[in-house]
Amino acid sequence: MSIGSATGDTVGPVSRLCVQSIAVRDRLRARLPDSELATGAEVWRDMEHLPAGAEQIEFWVPPAFVRDPVAMAAAAAKLTSLRVVQTQSAGVDAVLGWLPEHVQLCDARGVHGSSTSEWALTAILSVLREFPRFERARLERRWEDGVTDELAGKRVLIVGAGDVGRQLGRRLVACDAEPVFVARSARDGVHGVAELATLLPAADVVVLLVPQTSETLGMVGREFLHRMRDGALLVNAARGGIVDTEALLAELRSGRLRAALDVTDPEPLPADHPLWRVPNLLLTPHVGGAVLGLLDRFSALLADQVTRYERGEPLLNQVHGEY
């Protein structure tokens, strides 16, 4: 599919390119100083008030986190010239519900591989080597030594064999662990999701890296968790809705399983939510991709996309359906 700007288009009160991040806009302009779209790119941040001339926007980069899908849908409906939405995230579940059918959706696959895989590896090591326990002891000024578990020799089931999963696999091998990959369908070196029932009992760690779709929503429920071996670690770096929160809470309270979560359902967590107090849990506030190099990597992808759009060439990372 080839999408490009129409010949003879002119720039109105706002650019045909709108980016909802000043930092991304500035980096894009620096990368493409001769591009009409890039140099004229505008920043639009208030979802309640569209910029003047918004009907001319063709290429839209929404915020990294879509907190109000209803407001986003209302805004998108008024962008009558919209042709492309480029997300800053690898997951597009927050966009699919309001995206007009005629608009091409592109994700940020490849941008978050290093940062999210680093988070997953850090979370696994932190839990196995019991860093939270040692930190609590430090705050209490107690010298609490002891023997911990280790990552070496562990079998790590990676549910999601895309860019993030592959990068995590390489990092695990460097730690003398064994990555086992699972994807929607089986292929060379990758198990199909239908094999999960037999793979889960043999895994020491299970890492979730799948997109949230109608197929994966709630996939980690009571049966999934029940099949995990005693003492196993569940790591979720994907989306909170993939895990049944109540089922996970029951396993954590019993002490049978451990978990490390960067995403939750609901998100952000209300102050009175039981996940704040449950034992056997390492929790971070959806920061797996929030690293210093993120903006440069995303602006590089965006510069490539804008160049392709101006030339009428096929865009990268096109999403069709839920993937």
Image (cartoon, rainbow, N blue to C red):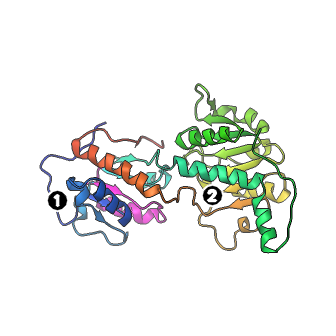
Label 1 sits on what residue type?
Val
Q: Which residues are magenta?
A: 59-83
Residue found at x 77% / y 51%: 128
Decide: is 40 above or below 210. Answer: below
Q: Is residue 247 visible?
A: no
Decide: is 157 above or below 122. Answer: above
Q: Is residue 209 magenta?
A: no
| Screen quadrant of the N terminus | top left
Q: Position of residue 55 (x, y in %)?
A: 23, 61
Q: Is residue 235 left or right of residue 87?
A: right
Q: Position of residue 135 (x, y in %)?
A: 76, 66
Q: Secondary structure at mark 2?
A: loop
Q: Secondary structure at mark 1?
A: loop
| Tally of numbered tags | 2
Distance, label 1 to label 2, CA atoms, is 41 Å
Label 2 sits on what residue type?
Asp
Residue found at x 82% / y 74%: 141
Tell me the number on the disc at residue 11.
1
